[in-house]
Image (tube, grey):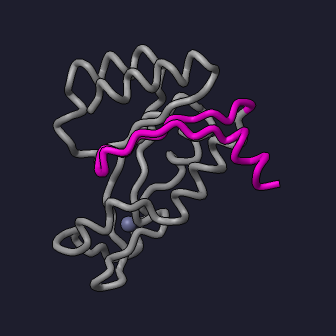
Amino acid sequence: MLDHFYKLAKRVVSKGGTVSFEWPRYCAGWDLPVLQQLILEFKLIQADIDGCSVGLKSAVTQNPMRKPWIFYCSQENLAKLFSARRCTGDHIHTTCQGKDTYLSGFYPEELAKLMIKGIVEQPHFHACVFNPVFEFTGVVDLDNAMQKMW
Ligand SMILES: [Zn+2]
């Protein structure tokens, strides 16, 4: 899984693009030497973010779910946008379990918009996004995508 990301990230970065990586904050995988090497090699910046700060809610109770993530981003701007989104502590969280476990694997719309904002505000729009929950790895050529949109 990380080998895939590494190969793709190397290609994207060689073309002047950017990369980001996300896992749950409390995940033993962060200690993997290969991941630490990857973070150093691509000079990724850590950004802690809480799901409740980007609209993540339980499908069962409709209450916010904290679901803390860590993103590592090669874009300082994106890392800053993410890091500004932390739990305000003024609400009750629903524990992520059962049906919510699966559904919380999808990013909330507010988080997706934040990602796009952080990526698009950079001079190069080529980006590599990796979500290990679905083992999805893809290169998004945002230059072409944006041209098609306009
Ligand atoms: Zn919260």
Ligand 1 is located in which of the four quadrants? bottom left
Where residue 129 appears, as percent x and y from the top left, is 47, 40
- Residue 75 shown left or right of residue 58 in the figure: right
In magenta, the rendered stretch is: 123-150
- From this viewpoint, which residue is outermost toward the right? 150
Residue 123 visible to the viewer? yes
Query: Left or right: 107 with respect to 118?
Result: left
Q: Quadrant of the N terminus?
A: top left
The answer to whether 31 appears left or right of 80 in the picture is left
Q: Quadrant of residue 110?
A: bottom right
Q: Nearer the viewer, residue 111 or 8?
A: 8
The residue closer to the viewer here, 63 or 60, is 60
Residue 126 x/y as whole percent: 63, 33
The residue shown at (57%, 15%) is 14
The residue positioned 57% from the left and 49% from the top of the image is 115
What is the quadrant of residue 123 in the picture? top right
Residue located 69% across and 43% down the image: 120
